[in-house]
Amino acid sequence: MDRILEKAGILSTVLAHMGAVALFGTMCLTAADVIGRYVFNSPILGVFEITEFLVLILIFSFIGYTQSQKNHVAVELLLKLFPEKVRAYIEVINHIICLVLMILITWMGLRKALELKAVGEASPNLGIPDYPFVFFLTIGCAVMCIEYIRDIVRLFSALKEHKSL
């Protein structure tokens, strides 16, 4: 089981690399638009739409990776007041709730992507279809679900080891 979860964890790294490319593309596109607008008085058509799509890719490519690295913001002010075992149970419950919410977001994202594909919705200026980007959102959320499952399995393993001591 651990081996399967480790292989699934590679997805978050792959998506993070895609996010880095999206970030680089956003920077280059913005710089080119600024130069075109102020130096040549000729802005790039649809740069706002393309930037919106790239930012979506950027955000949803990094959420799973950020979870795998434990870099999401966490407030532990009250948690430190509890014993270690209680904190572990609270963390398991928190991860399960987050997993359920991410599963719902993934499912609703998939439904929305299929709906957008069926109606053929596209960006107003360039006519870029919206549904591939909503599918990407769904993939990013699914990878986040995988990371939560990996964390829950690790937490249960740690709790099991803690009970045997």
Image (cartoon, rainbow, N blue to C red):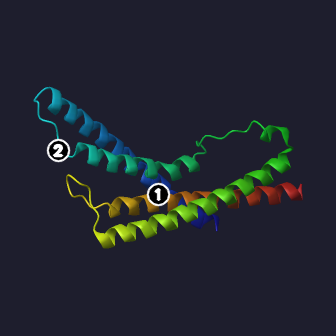
Residue occupying the point 17% across, 40% down = 44
Residue occupying the point 58% across, 42% down = 71
* Quarter in which the C terminus is drawn: bottom right
Q: Quadrant of residue 158?
A: bottom right
User: Can see residue 100?
Assistant: yes
Q: Quadrant of residue 130?
A: bottom left
User: Can see residue 7?
Assistant: no
Q: Position of residue 2 (x, y in %)?
A: 64, 64
- Report which residue position mark 1 lands on: 140
Q: Position of residue 6 (x, y in %)?
A: 57, 60
- Report which residue position mark 2 lands on: 45
Q: Position of residue 20 (x, y in %)?
A: 38, 44
Q: Secondary structure at mark 2?
A: loop
- Amino acid type, label 1: Gly
In the figure, is residue 40 to the left or right of 63? left
Binning the other alpha carbons within 10 Å of mark 2 as few (below 14), some (14 to 19) or many (20 upward) gives few
